[in-house]
Image (tube, grey):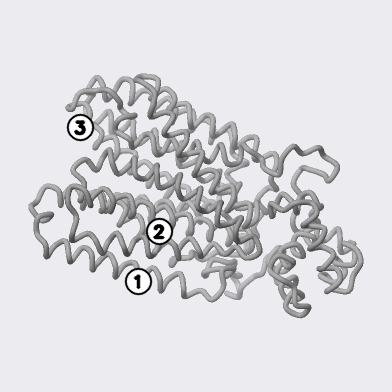
Amino acid sequence: MKPSDMARALAPEERTSEGDALSSTLYPWRFLGMGLLIAWLCCTHVVSIFPGDVDAEARGLRTVFDTGMRFGDIATFLVLALAASRIGPLGKRMATSAAFVVLTSIGTACIGLWLIPSQASETVIAAASFATAIGGAFLFCLWAEIYCQMGSMRTIVYGALSCIVAAIASFVIGTMAAPYAIIATALLPILSLICIALSLSTVPAEPTRLANTRFPLPWKLFGLMAIAGLLSGLVGSLLSNADGTGAIHRVAATGLSGVVILVMVFLRRERCDVRFLAKIGLPICIIALATVSFAGSSWAYAISFLIKLAYVWFTLFVLLMLANIAYRFEVPSLRLFAIARAVSEGAIFLGVSARRWVQQTELLSNDAFLYAVAIAGIVLLLICTLIWMSERSVNADWGASGISIESSVHVPEPREQLIVRCEKLALEHGLTERETEILELIAQGKSRVEIEQALFLSQNTVKAHARHLYAKLGVHSKEGVYELVNG
């Protein structure tokens, strides 16, 4: 096999050739579909949208709905995680996924239009909510599988655009009158599924894993998700109407995060490290927690928004790190993301439960309690800092890469081997970070157009970097790069 053929086999090209007429370097359905899923999650937690214009007694059933959805999420993610090795890539089981997604859309409509307004029994609402959550969990894992095959830069950009789409869609639905808002919310999962079908046709399939390899779990990253979720759920204790306001704050924080990430990515094109997400989220959260003891009718809303903003930042950081691990080390995505979401949802549920308990007591008027909460929260954040700084490299596997069952030795997958060889060459020849990224893509057999799409660079910029790259390596063509990387 020629070196060029070997490189292409290591990382299959997208189903796009250099001669294709491309109107844009973006595939809109990749961020639209993920954004619509996030919008569904947001809208079902905004009281003014779901269940909408109903009396106070019916709105009281939202707690039952929220709890049922939360348990449905956790249970589904745990089942998917436990059965991940048997299920394999979820994208190959679209019929099953589609059935659960349709059930989710039907359940969303029935609960919002009928069960809550008619004040059905709590048992019926809890059961319906549990079933409704299943399709949402499948959608999340399908999108995780897609994003894990796109590479780091595209994952960051598409993720940011998804946040913006989610905020816009949520606010648009929020302006609709009942029952149209609930109907629109119920359609979001199906629209997201359609976008998944379109996206699966334009990304490489997730690689088949070796049966004699086990993949440990990156527990430190899961710990970050748990701490962020706990603080997000607990912060509503300061609000008089947390069930409505907290969800709105999360929508706004999601959209703002997407905008800021896009700006930072394009300002830092030559050096984009996803750790900047944690570096921004940390001070935001510390500022919010440090002012908890001064929380009053006005401060409470500002603190809530800042905590939600920090939660979104930390969540995006962890999810992007997990996607990078799955891409670079070819770790199966299903178990990885299912456990991450189960941990996050479980932590949020604990935080919400603690919030509801606190609101039933007189603790919020106790200054000592507020100081203790602030100190405990800051300590948790410092633990987060130690966790994400413990890995020396942003490309570290966080303990998740494959290990041989027989020898208990790390088993480097083809893509990891290729990337490591490229990084060694980059160090030897003094390549810049951008030139190293282009070297890796060329070594994977990517066309010029695909490199432009992967890094969101213009044709002239890619050509200029490629010229510098060839000069430093002492080669004159892509074939020369293949020979050098695989020699």
Q: Secondary structure at mark 1?
A: helix
User: How many other residues sit within 10 Å of disc 1, few (<14), some (14-19) or many (≥20)?
Assistant: few
Sequence-first tag of 3 and 1: 3
Classify 302 as above or below 482: above
Question: In the image, is 246 to the left or to the right of 149?
Answer: left
Reading the image, the residue beneath label 2 is 225
Q: Is residue 50 or residue 76 the one in the foreground?
A: 50
The earlier-in-sequence mark between 1 and 2 is 2
In the rendered image, the vertical position of residue 35 relative to residue 476, given as above or below: above
Mark 3 against mark 1, which lies toward the viewer?
1
Q: Position of residue 348 (x, y in %)?
A: 32, 51
Percent x, y for residue 318?
48, 59
User: How many numbered discs, if any?
Assistant: 3
Q: Which residue is mark 1?
A: 382
Placement of the C terminus among the 4 image quadrants: bottom right
- Name the amino acid type tagged 3: Gly
Please report whichever mark, 3 or 2, sits nearer to the chain's N-terminal start. Answer: 3
User: Which residue appears farthest toward the right when viewing the image?
Assistant: 476
Q: Which labelled disc corresponds to residue 60?
A: 3
- Quadrant of the rendered structure where residue 72 is? top left
What is the three-letter code of the residue carrying label 2? Met
User: How far is disc 1 from disc 2 in space, using C-alphas?
Assistant: 14 Å
Distance CA(mark 3)–CA(mark 1): 37 Å
Q: Is residue 184 left or right of residue 473?
A: left
How crowded pointer 2 is (Cα within 10 Å; few <14, some 14-19, many 20+) is rated as: many
